[in-house]
Amino acid sequence: NAGVTQTPKFQVLKTGQSMTLQCAQDMNHEYMSWYRQDPGMGLRLIHYSVGAGITDQGEVPNGYNVSRSTTEDFPLRLLSAAPSQTSVYFCASRASSYNEQFFGPGTRLTVL
Amino acid sequence: SQKIEQNSEALNIQEGKTATLTCNYTNYSPAYLQWYRQDPGRGPVFLLLIRENEKEKRKERLKVTFDTTLKQSLFHITASQPADSATYLCALGPKNTDKLIFGTGTRLQVFP
């Protein structure tokens, strides 16, 4: 099992560009989440999903879109990148609410 | 407002001693609490889960306590080793939601 995979590992964008961060898991987990991690701010929840076709907002959803068309994939779209979105992004999955969460290796995004 | 607070300052302890990390929360009603370890440049890794009706959980050299009256969890590493040096994150699973909300983390440094 590959676990949770994320692509790309690094990305540099210019302000106003759009892009999609990819996330996939092969553990058949229902729950998937996106977090961003900034120095001194910890992990902040952007969006999450409890199954295919179901998504909801986390603490910091503005500027990001998600969709969940399959159990395996949960892409995160940046609509119009801003320097404030410079961060490390982690995707995570878990089987259900009480279960341990598995994290991907992260994507380091810089917006110039 | 809702907060999950962990010591922002690093905890430095000598090898062999017990490390104790604190997680305090306000305006949350958690169904459970989890602890994760994060090494630099990597995603967090799950360590332990404790439910609201449990006072204590142990796993090898790790012990977690959960006091819903004090709104606090303590995370202990006994006989600490330099390999335990990392950032430790607590995460809350609030009742009536499927979110998992993280604290800011505490960096632990164990020196020989």
Image: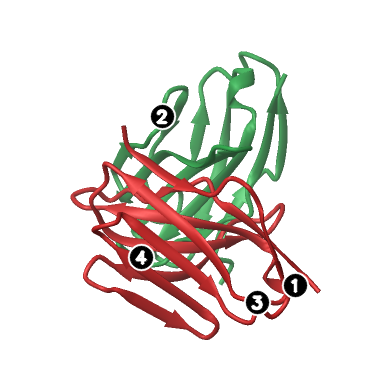
Looking at the picture, do discs 2 and 1 lie on one chain?
Answer: no
* Residue at figure coordinates x 37%, y 44% from the top left: A48
How dense is the environment of label 2, judged by Cα within 10 Å: few (below 14), some, or many (20 and up)? Answer: some
Residue beneath label 1, please? B82
Q: What hue does chain B carry in this figure?
A: red
Q: Chain of mark 2?
A: A
Hey, what amino acid is under mark 4?
Ala
Residue beneath label 4, please? A95
Element type at marker 4? loop
Q: Nearer the viewer, mark 4 or mark 3?
A: 3
Q: Chain of mark 3?
A: B
Sequence-first tag of 4 and 2: 2
* Residue A82 pos. (x, y %): 60, 18
Element type at marker 1? helix
Query: Which chain has been coloured green in this picture?
Result: A
Residue beneath label 3, please? B17
* Residue at figure coordinates x 48%, y 67% from the top left: B75
- Mark 4 and mark 3: Cα distance apart in space: 36 Å
